[in-house]
Each structure stands twice: as C-alpha cells, then as structure tokens.
Image: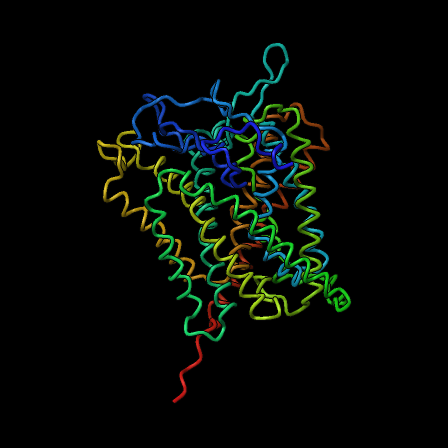
Amino acid sequence: MGRKLTRGVKWKSKNAQGYFADLFKQLLEARPFTRSGGSPDTELRTFRYGSDAGGGGGGEVCDSAEPAAGTGQKISEWQAGWNVTNAIQGMFLVSLPYAVLFGGYWAIFALVFVAYICCHTGKILVACLYEPDERGELVRVRDSYVSIAITCLGERWGGKMVNIAQIIELLMTCILYVVLCGDLMIGTFPDGPVDQRSWMMICTMLLLSCAFLRKLTAVSWLSFWCTVAHIFINVAIVGYCLSRAPDWAWGKVQTKIDFHMFPVTLGIVVFSYTSQIFLPTLEGNMIDKTKFHCMLNWSHIAAAVFKAGFAWIAFLTWGEQTHEVITNNLPTQGFKGFINFILVVKALLSYPLPYYAAANLIEASYFQGKPETPFPTCFAQDGEYRIWAVSLRVLLILFTVLLAISIPHFALLMGLIGSFTGTMLSFVWPCYFHMKLKWETLTWGTIAWEGFIIFMGVLCGVIGIYDSAAALIEAYHIPLPYPPPAPM
C-alpha cells in the first residue's frame, strides 16, 4: 500500500516524504513568481522550490495548474487522498475531545456534518475551475481559488480577499503550533521552574532558523517521520482509552447545547476540516481527474469516522476533566511526558511548512519590486536574500510567537480561526462562487442547499468570532500555570 501511495510522484529524493510536504511540493513549483511583464503571481502553486529559487525577476510561469510536460508530477487518486486525509487529520486532532466537553453529542454530529459540507464545497470549488466549450465539453479555464475569486469578485478585491485569508490561515497555524508547544511542555512539567510563556520562547529559539529557509527539501524529509509519530500517538491514546472502557462516563456526554461555548466548538471543528485552498492544484495534478469526487468522498468519510470516534472515546475516558490538549489527561507523568515530547518535536518540525508558505505569499504580494508591488525585491544581484529581507523574515517568526504568548489558549484560538477564515474559505466563498458562475445550470434544490450553507457559515462565523473572542478575553485574565514560589 505504501509503495502504491508514493509511486510516480516527482521528488528529488526517492524516499517517502510526508503528507504535508507531498502536498506542498505539488503546489510549490520551481519557477519565478512573476509573469513576464505582468503582476506578481501569488498562487500557492508558484512558490520557489529547489536550487533555482532566485530573485523575483520576470520569468515564465505555468498559466495552469497542470504540471509541465515531462515533469512526471502527476499523482494518482491514492496519493491525492493521502494528502487530503492527512491535511484534515493533523495535530489539531488532540483538541477535538475538548469540543465534545461543551458540545456533547452535537459536537460529534458536527464532526460528521461539517465533513459532509466541506466535501461538497470542495467539489463545487473545483467545478468552478471548468467551463463548457463550444462543443459542450468541460474545459479547465481557471487554476486556483484565487483565480475563481478574481472572476467572481473582480481583480481588485477578489484575489486580495482570498490571498489575505490564506495568509491569516497559515500564520495562525504557525501560532497554534507555538501555543501547542507551550501547553504540552507545561503539562509535562507542571511544577517545574519554567512557565508556559517561557516554554514558548524557548521553542522559538529553535524556530529562528526558519528565517533562512529557501528550499523545502531542507525540511520535507522530516515530514514522513512526523506522520509516523502522529500515527503512533493516535494509536497510544486510543489504545489507552479502550483499556479504560469499563470506566467510561457514558452519562457525561450531554445532549443539551452550551450556547456560550458551542460556537467555539464549531470553530474548532471547521478549522480541522479546512483544505479548500489546496484542492484546485491537487485536482489539476491528478492523473485521472474523474476520480476526484470519489477520492474526496472517501477521504472525508475516513476523517469524519476517525475524528468522531476519537473525540467520543477520549471524552468518555476523561469526562468533565478533559483538557484543551487531550494528551495532558494521560495518567502517569512518564507516559504523558513521553507522548507530549513527541508532539512538541512534531509541532516544531511542522512549523516551517506553513511559515514557508506564508512568507512566500507575503513576498510575492508585496516584495517583487516596483511598480508591480509596493516594495523592492528581497533578493540581491547574486540571488541571495538581502539583510533587511532576512530581518523581516525573523520578525515574522517573532510576530507569530508574540501573538502566541499574548493568546496562550490553544482550543479557544483554534475556534476563533475556524470561525473567521475557516467558515469563509470552506463554507461561504465556495457556495457563492459556485452559484455566481453556474446559476443557470443549478436546480432549485442545489441553490437552496448552498444558500443554507452560506447562511450557516455567516451565522456560525459571526457568533463564533464573538464567543471565541469573549472566551479568550475572559481566559486572558485567568493566571497561567506559574512555578510555585521558592520556600523561604
């Protein structure tokens, strides 16, 4: 099975690479950012990758998501499914039992229902890439989420809105990794001499080298071991929960809704399913595009079953004592410390990928030289980063850490992000774009369903942002775990 999943993908190494690195390698083409004589290309598919990541001069770039002929970059439906499944079943799985704490069976239902909605919006988003030609055959005329937005909302606002949402999503993912490190370390050493914020700053020292990252190959080989570690952690937690089955608190899973915290719960669930920004490029690189719907169906079914099952049995095991990060509930200090240490290493190794993507999107949007962009290029004549450019990349890391230190509450921050960018990228925009581009071909049932999704996305987004922000403000005044005072 593993051989089938990795066969035929164009990598410079023949070893298995990780799920997230696999996806980004498909997206990050080894080409300059700008079209000749045109404006900067801010698509995820045009990130620099490899040794030719030079300065942003006017070069040639693919005008479609199709890989160049002869690159061998096509992927099978198994590889695409592997990417999607792992993208929506990442590290943030550890916070799902906390969602059941406040949402009960409704949170479990949401884990399945949101998977169904996101699967549907993923399909219709890809459908927006196609238009019928004069013979009535569907032809791929767009290549990305941003190009769809430009068609529907105009070049001035469409691309910018989706681009900003992508940058926020990626930077917030970086922030969540840092917060997770702090949560895990303080859970491992609750009585140690270092508090949660200090652990975050210590972890930051290990992340500063990301500012010099120019080749994704520098971290991609680690992603496979990140995935192996995550599978091991999931098996360990599920195995422990099953061993405690006789003591499960069946009566603790509530059927009523905590209206104050349930919107936060929905934000957590939505964030855990956000993958729409990658789907256009992923579909464009598939060998057989007719299998895209089947692949998306099964990857979301697998995610929904595992997430709902994991969240349910973990909550049954710990009940009302469930923590924001479920590994902090593990019984013995040695077992908990071992699992938490593996998760911290995984979080640190996962940080460079969204950071790399966010930094390059910002660079492509604002630092390609005048008059195309407001600021000069980040590269000197020899193709190396200028000193001020490296300084800005270091500041971007420090910015993510500063926000993490300011908002050190993992689940609440995850709910806020899901309510903000998650609902727009996964619910509202795909349905709006689909109805705008395909209105004449849609049935009234489809229009009603997609209108309902938009209504749900806006409603849950607004209420979720308000409740998540209110919960964060309230939690901000609660003291974090600090080391006990030294005896006199």
Residue 327 vs residue 176, the one in the foreground: 327
Label total for image: 0
Q: Residue at x 53, y 36 (%)?
A: 278
Residue 107 vs residue 204, the one in the foreground: 204
Task: Report the side of 311 relative to 90 (left or right).
Answer: right
Task: Please provide percent x and percent y for residue 232.
Answer: 60, 53
**Quadrant assignment for the N terminus:** top right
Q: Residue at x 26, y 31 (%)?
A: 370
Q: Residue at x 59, y 57 (%)?
A: 94
Task: Report the side of 464 relative to 484 (left or right).
Answer: right
Task: Please provide percent x and percent y for residue 62.
Answer: 43, 22
Task: Report the side of 442 relative to 370 (left or right).
Answer: right
Q: Is residue 168 above or below residue 66?
A: below
**Quadrant assignment for the C terminus:** bottom left
Q: Is residue 268 above or below residue 300?
A: below
In terms of image quadrants, where is residue 47?
top left
In terms of image quadrants, where is residue 50?
top left
Give the farthest residue toward the bottom.
Answer: 488
Q: Is residue 33 above or below residue 100?
A: above
* Residue 284 visible here: no
* Residue 457 visible here: yes
Colouring chosen for the image of the structure: rainbow
Task: Please provide percent x and percent y for residue 153.
Answer: 49, 31
Task: Report the side of 272 relative to 50 (left or right).
Answer: right
Q: Residue at x 50, y 60 (%)?
A: 341
Task: Please provide percent x and percent y for residue 486.
Answer: 40, 83
